[in-house]
Image: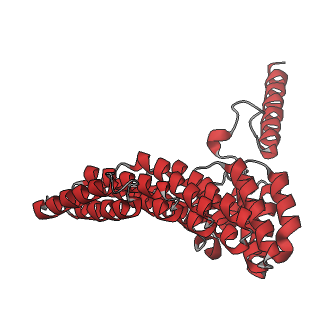
Amino acid sequence: MNTAKIEEGRELVRQAEKCLKTSLLKWRPEYDLAADYYTKAATAFRIGKSYDQSRDCLLKAVDCYKHNTAWFHAARCYEQIVLICKETNNLLQVEEYANKAANLYQQHGSPESAAAALDKAAKVVEQKHPDMALRFYQHALEVSMIEDSSRSAIEYCSKVSRILVKLRMYDQAADALRREIGLNQQCESYGQIGRLAVVLVMVQLARGDQVAAEKAFKEWGNCCDAQEVQTLEMLLQAYDDEDPDTALRALSSPFIKHMDVEYALLAREVPLPQGMPASKADVIKNATASYTSPNADLSQSEDGAGDAADEEEEEGGLC
């Protein structure tokens, strides 16, 4: 701990408390000055690695800003608390403060800042708590849709799709991908639609719905480039033919391997068609009679005829 910084923080807290006191000559607390002192104290405590005191000062600053309806500055304080949660590894508390920050940004009329705050929070927790990150991205998407910001909406929708695939929530991933395709249609990003069509086909196959996979290709295949079309045709034909080897070759295409990590990993998760031929271990015992050569029957009959002739000769000889 940096004792000098902690002492500096304590002095700033005393200044803030003094600003909040009223007297005969000062009827109203000076919330703006107090908030300024509290935020400076929070910084000093954070540098001094006294994180609990830093968080407490930021919460007091939030109260002061709210008294002055300074929603934007209050939201910034909540974002600072999110960073403290990251440094102290208290990631489960991130959701509360990030959502409060986003709500205050929206209240201030800054939806872009709200979505950006949610995006930052998602990046903080995504590695250890992808389910929480998913909620942040979904919230950011909703904010962007309200603002009618297509570019931002596409970005957040893409993150929602990827994390749903990562979590193997394939039903929701299919819906998110269709929504992402629709947003790209609005921006006429046809190349991106082609790539998403490939992912949607794989997701539908991962769901075990070959009919939906074929429907996705028929609907969006015209946006795919030649390599994507060739790969999808090979893949779907392999499922029709129940040919796991060809399906595996299609899923191992170089351009699929170079897609976003979640989609490249998805290609390994797609169940291959249950193909033929069967191995020796799959042969059913005594299902049919054992194979015998026709020549063997012929030789046996010849041997039998020879034996009969010998017997006749022996009988004649005895007579």
Residue 110 location in percent, x, y? 61, 67
- Residue 124 image-quadrant placement: bottom left
When the figure is inspected, residue 174 is found, relative to residue 217, above or below; the finding is: above
* Outermost residue toward the top in this view: 319
Q: Point out the image quarter for the C terminus.
A: top right
Residue drawn 80% across the image and 32% down it: 304
When the figure is inspected, residue 227 is found, relative to residue 100, above or below; the finding is: below
Q: Point out the image quarter for the N terminus.
A: bottom left
* Outermost residue toward the left in this view: 3
In the displayed structure image, the side of residue 22 where residue 192 appears, left or right: right
Q: How many marks?
A: 0
In the displayed structure image, the side of residue 147 where residue 112 appears, left or right: left
In the displayed structure image, the side of residue 260 where residue 171 appears, left or right: right
Residue drawn 54% across the image and 60% down it: 118
When the figure is inspected, residue 233 is found, relative to residue 225, above or below; the finding is: above
- Residue 30 image-quadrant placement: bottom left
Residue sitting nearer the eye, 186 or 30: 30
Q: Determine if residue 72 is in view.
A: yes
Residue drawn 61% across the image and 75% down it: 254
In the displayed structure image, the side of residue 244 where residue 302 appears, left or right: right
Residue 163 location in percent, x, y? 58, 57
Residue 255 location in percent, x, y? 64, 76
- Colour convention: secondary structure
